[in-house]
Image (cartoon, helix red, strand yellow):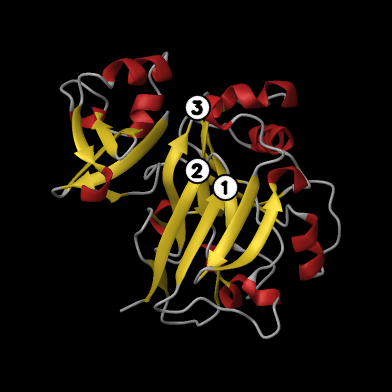
Amino acid sequence: MKLVTFSAAGQKSWGVVEGEMIAAIGQTAGAPATLRKALEQPGAMAKIAAAVASASRFSLASVALEPVLPDPDKILCVGLNYENHRKETGREEVSHPTIFTRFANSQVGHNRPMIRPKVSTHYDYEGELALVIGKPGRHIAKADAFNHIAGYACYNDGSIRDWQRHTIQFTPGKNFIGTGAFGPWLVTPDEVGPLEKLRLMTRLNGITVQETTLGDMIFDIPTIIAYCSTFTQLEIGDVIVTGTPGGVGAKRTPPLWMKAGDRVEIEIDRVGLLQNPIVDEI
């Protein structure tokens, strides 16, 4: 299944994508109000699938897509998780994943404008795979990690590089409002299959600027889930963003910054295509 959160006629809802249509389960009487609440139900995927037949329909073209999970308890991001990106930044090898956080209001949905803040022109792209937790857990073993995943989505960890570098902590440069993107939908693991050979690409104005396979991660997904679940309880609906490959704008000569009028695309095989225009903060 492909699960989405969307807005129609000023009302936020959620549903299942079927071709060019959405089965709007969130508008069915008695349905959970949000996708996160739906995922928290016992037997969530079976209940969602069973509700599709009786749901009203919207065309994808008629709605505005929101971040897949607009209300996660946590957004945990992995930095420097591809070797070519680690090398281009000049960072040393590490024994554990580099983890930072994003806030929910730093995200927008598919086709929504990503906002370059007025205090900086150093706005960079980062194409990444995101996963959403579907089963809570603490001290999750690597062997059990995939059992805790509800699905996958594309993510653009848009970064304000000069603010990211004010100190050794990443948080300010990763959390300006509307600078990241999450979507277009959440694809359940049965539709994605094995991850290692899937290709991730970032395009800026139609030109490929990042390209890799997911198997090139330094720390794989089981390692990331095991590590994160050791220091925090992973809850249903939590988002983990797994890192970006080399080719970021900050490390090009000259640097390649996103600007108003640009269009950025993140594409991952069998997961989706996330597209966003860039606008300046008003």
**Can see residue 136?**
no
* Label 3 to label 2: alpha-carbon separation: 13 Å
Is 280 above or below relative to 136?
below
Label 2 crowding class (10 Å Cα cut-off): few <14, some 14-19, many 20+? some
- Residue at 58 percent across and 44 percent down: it is 269
For this rendering, which residue is in front, 71 or 44?
44
Q: Is residue 113 left or right of residue 212?
A: left
Q: Quadrant of residue 251?
A: bottom right
Which residue corresponds to mark 3? 134
Which residue corresponds to mark 2? 74
For this rendering, which residue is in front, 197 or 233?
197
Number of the front mark, 1 or 3:
1
* Label 2 to label 1: alpha-carbon separation: 23 Å
> Which comes before the other along the chain, label 1 or label 3?
3
Q: Are marks 1 and 3 in contact (CB under 8 Å)?
A: no
- Residue at 54 percent across and 63 percent down: it is 174
Q: Quadrant of residue 193?
A: top right
Give the percent coordinates (x, y) of residue 126.
59, 61
Number of the front mark, 3 or 2:
3
Q: Is residue 132 left or right of residue 82?
A: left
Give amino acid for label 1: Ile
Q: Secondary structure at mark 3?
A: loop
Q: Secondary structure at mark 1?
A: strand
Q: Is residue 98 left or right of residue 137?
A: right
> Which comes before the other along the chain, label 2 or label 1?
2
Is 6 above or below relative to 38?
below
Question: Which mark is drawn over residue 268?
Answer: 1
Give amino acid for label 3: Gly
